[in-house]
Image (cartoon, rainbow, N blue to C red):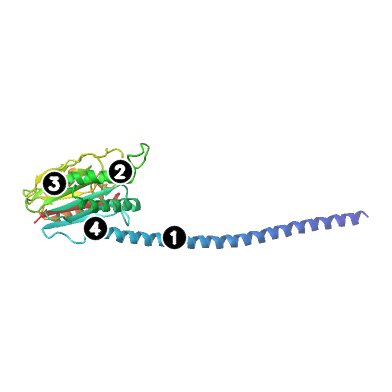
Amino acid sequence: MMKEKTDLSEIEKLEEEISKQNKRIKNLEMQIKLGSNLAKELERQKSLAIEAQEEVKKSLQYSSRIQGAMLPSSLPENLTVAKIWKPLSVVGGDFYVIKDLGESIMIAVIDCTGHGVPGALLSTLTGSIFDRLIHDPNVNMAGEYLMAAHNLISTMLGQHVDSKAKSNDGFDGSICLVNKQTKTLSFAGARSSIFLIQNNGEAHELSGNRKSVGGSRTPLDFPFDTQEIELGDQIVVMLTDGILDVMSEEPNLVLFGKERLLNILTLWNDQDPDRIINNVQIALDNHRGTQPFRDDMTMVAFRLN
């Protein structure tokens, strides 16, 4: 009798163990099934991510073509021009304007807030504003262009409507109006300078106002100064701060800076805009070594023929 009870107990234990094993098998089967579904879902998500990346890439390439189309496609015959235009990404916030206005030629170099897509969007807005101002009979002097652009950007972005507005988007930049007949230059700058290279090889800086265009920090109707000089045969160099902010290699991180630029413009002056731009590019590459660029870069050198 004792033996039968023992046998029954063993059988019950075996049945219990078999039941546990069956549950484990079912759990494993469920995990395998879930794993298979998860793998399929991961593959689907990966495919969607790749498609999204391709769409973003196509959009950026299209944006790059649009931004490139905004730049001058032809140049005035009586102006010799050389330039650097290098967005940090596929698109950027820098652009330049060279426009024959009849009696004068407009040359502007603009650095909009940010880089990449946000900078490119703001540069498109700013470019359309310049197109509008060119046809405004009330805007004639270089400083008036900057003041009118500031008022339009501030109004469009509501920067002076709400005291709590966080948008300080806008641009820093310089604008030159060159009179073809008198060979005089009218200049205005928003936190920007131009550099003049004389026939004797000396280079010096002409500074603009220390206010940006756009943003609540600059009052509406701010009177940007217009400075007029005899241009003659001088070469004018205009640029964005991406040029000056190129950094050298570690461990001694040093900005390229204005002083270095002035030295290069003086020492390597060939009285030719193309050679000046080429010399600056060589100096920038030597200065940075393997250090990557940190910002969009634009430089325009010109001379009236």
Q: Residues within 10 Å of mark 4 (few under 14, many from 20)?
A: some
What amino acid does circle 1 point to? Answer: Ala
Query: In terms of sequence position, does the residue under pointer 1 or pointer 2 come before the other?
Result: 1
Residue depicted at x 22% and y 43%: 147
Query: In terms of sequence position, does the residue under pointer 2 or pointer 3 come before the other?
Result: 2
Mark 2 near mark 4, Cβ–Cβ under 8 Å? no
- Element at label 1: helix
Q: Which residue is mark 3?
A: 186
The nearer-to-camera label among 1 and 2 is 2
The nearer-to-camera label among 2 and 3 is 2
Q: Is residue 202 visible?
A: no
Q: Nearer the viewer, residue 245 or 198?
A: 198
- Element at label 2: helix
Q: Which residue is mark 4?
A: 71
CA gap, disc 3 and disc 1: 48 Å
Q: Which residue is mark 2?
A: 154
On the rendered image, what quadrant is the N terminus found in? bottom right
What amino acid does circle 3 point to? Answer: Ser
Q: Which residue is mark 1?
A: 52
CA gap, disc 3 and disc 4: 22 Å
Q: Residues within 10 Å of mark 2 (few under 14, many from 20)?
A: many
Query: In terms of sequence position, does the residue under pointer 3 or pointer 4 come before the other?
Result: 4
- The residue most toward the top is 163
Query: In terms of sequence position, does the residue under pointer 3 or pointer 1 come before the other?
Result: 1
Query: In terms of sequence position, does the residue under pointer 1 or pointer 4 come before the other?
Result: 1
Left or right: 200 with respect to 157? left
The image position of residue 50, as x and y in percent, is: 45, 62
Is 211 rendered above or below residue 6? above
- The residue most toward the front is 137
What amino acid does circle 2 point to? Answer: Ser
